[in-house]
Image (cartoon, rainbow, N blue to C red):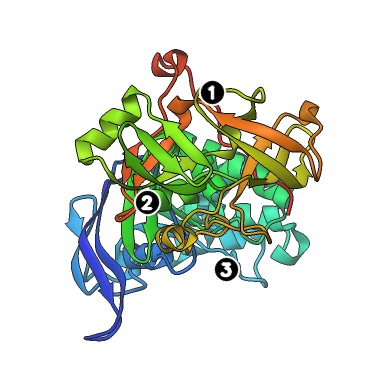
Amino acid sequence: MARVRFVDVTKRYGDDGPEAISGLNLDIADGEFVVLVGPSGSGKSTALRMLAGLEDISSGEIWIGDRVVNDLAPRERDIAMVFQNYALYPHMSVRENMGFALQLEHKGKQQIDEKVREAAIALELDEFLDRKPAQLSGGQRQRVAMGRAIVREPQAFLMDEPLSNLDAKLRVQTREEIADLQRRLAVTTVYVTHDQTEALTLGDRIAVLRRGRLQQFGPSDDLYLEPANVFVAGFIGSPSMNFVTGEAADGAIELPFGPFALDERLRAALDAGGGGRAVVVGLRPEDIHPVATGTSDGLHFDAVVDTVESTGADLYAHARIDGGTGDEARIETLVGDVEGAAPSRARDGAARIVARLDPVTRAHAGTRLTLGVDPERVYLFDAATGDALAGARLDEEAAAGVPASAPASAPPS
């Protein structure tokens, strides 16, 4: 087990080529489970490959334990990697696959057998030790790949999208197994995924990358409730946060569908950065709820439902806001590479939002609703930089230590 650090690490392809990673700084504690997450091309796999020694770095330092490993070959770094495609030897049995690395280290047969047996029991593979990979399910093969890493007792596990080849149900099951195993072994783990649900449920801390730059690094609750910028807000949470542009002045924000009077929290956030400017208002689908027609409290707007998606427990309503158009080009620039986060428009030009509703609302296409958001659940961002001005405020129970509700699962595709 070891502490892992990236210190001002940059990866550039060619002397004058583009930077895949720009000045990355991460400090991963001994025994911590850290997830690198981001859209395609964000640099997360490149960062992992540099840590593994499979990619050279252009500048900076990578530390594993008390050693700078920049110039060490992968086999000298005392790490074990679990790949997306399992990388098992098809002609070897499960037992042979799991013990092969120990054979290369010239360990004794008895020692290899003991370590393989212990790992197999931990992974519930002991009855499959004499089978070949072709005789196993996808989930079992992934566990064999993990077992091969476990028997080496490395300083760190590196996992590169290990669940992407599994079906949805098996992915959830294997995710739970990985989390439980990592807690029991207490091995420093760096895990790469493009799936933010995996990141939120697995990581002690999550590093969000965009175009090679670190956007935010912290626990899942911090990323969800206090995103550093519009990009993180749009990436974390499913469905993605809704965004609407407006102009802040005189204690209110003028939105395309009407003014929104600021509460003390939002007014203080704007005053701290200077009022009278363009802002982006963020609304999470799970914070939007029907309110009485004609209500005057908080942020509210009239909408017409275009389509609905039902998961049984939740109803996702895709609705047009009456009078809403918004500055989509501005938001597109800030979150354009987050799938589903960029704003969309109905055919009549009105802005659209997604709301997670209780199924008892019985909303359907054509339903007219007045929707509202508690002011304390409104997010605020600077429209020029995308930086956060105000996150969501926790209620008194959550602030006292009661866990916040988990982000919603994605609606059906």
Name the residue beneath numbered marker 2.
156
Compare marks 1 and 3 and give the one earlier in the sequence.
3
Q: Secondary structure at mark 1?
A: loop
Compare marks 1 and 2 and give the one earlier in the sequence.
2
Q: In the figure, 87 relative to 275: above or below?
A: below
Name the residue beneath numbered marker 3.
87
Q: Secondary structure at mark 3?
A: loop
Instruction: Check whether the beta carbons of the residues at disc 1 and disc 2 lie within 8 A of each other.
Output: no
Q: Residue at x 35, y 64 (%)?
A: 47
Horizontal side of 322 relative to 80 (left or right) equals: right
Q: Secondary structure at mark 2?
A: strand
Which quadrant of the figure contains the C terminus? bottom right
- Asked whether 383 or 2 is in front, the reply is 383
Name the residue beneath numbered marker 1.
296
Q: Residue at x 36, y 45 (%)?
A: 381
Q: Please rate how many residues cluster around mark 1, counting C-alpha atoms within 10 Å: few if below 14, some from 14 to 19, many from 20.
A: few
Q: CA distance from mark 1 to mark 2?
A: 55 Å
- Asked whether 217 or 368 is in front, the reply is 368
Camera sees residue 35: no
Q: In the figure, 235 relative to 289: above or below?
A: below
For badge 3, the amino acid type reads Ala
Residue 397 placement (x, y as % from top left): 46, 13
Horizontal side of 369 relative to 250 (left or right) equals: right
Q: In the figure, 70 relative to 154: above or below?
A: below
Compare marks 2 and 3 and give the one earlier in the sequence.
3
Q: Nearer the viewer, mark 1 or mark 3?
A: 1
Residue 85 placement (x, y as % from top left): 60, 67
Q: Please rate how many residues cluster around mark 2, counting C-alpha atoms within 10 Å: few if below 14, some from 14 to 19, many from 20.
A: many
Q: Residue at x 30, y 65 (%)?
A: 76
- Asked whether 213 or 56 is in front, the reply is 213
For badge 2, the amino acid type reads Ala
Q: Please rate how many residues cluster around mark 3, counting C-alpha atoms within 10 Å: few if below 14, some from 14 to 19, many from 20.
A: few
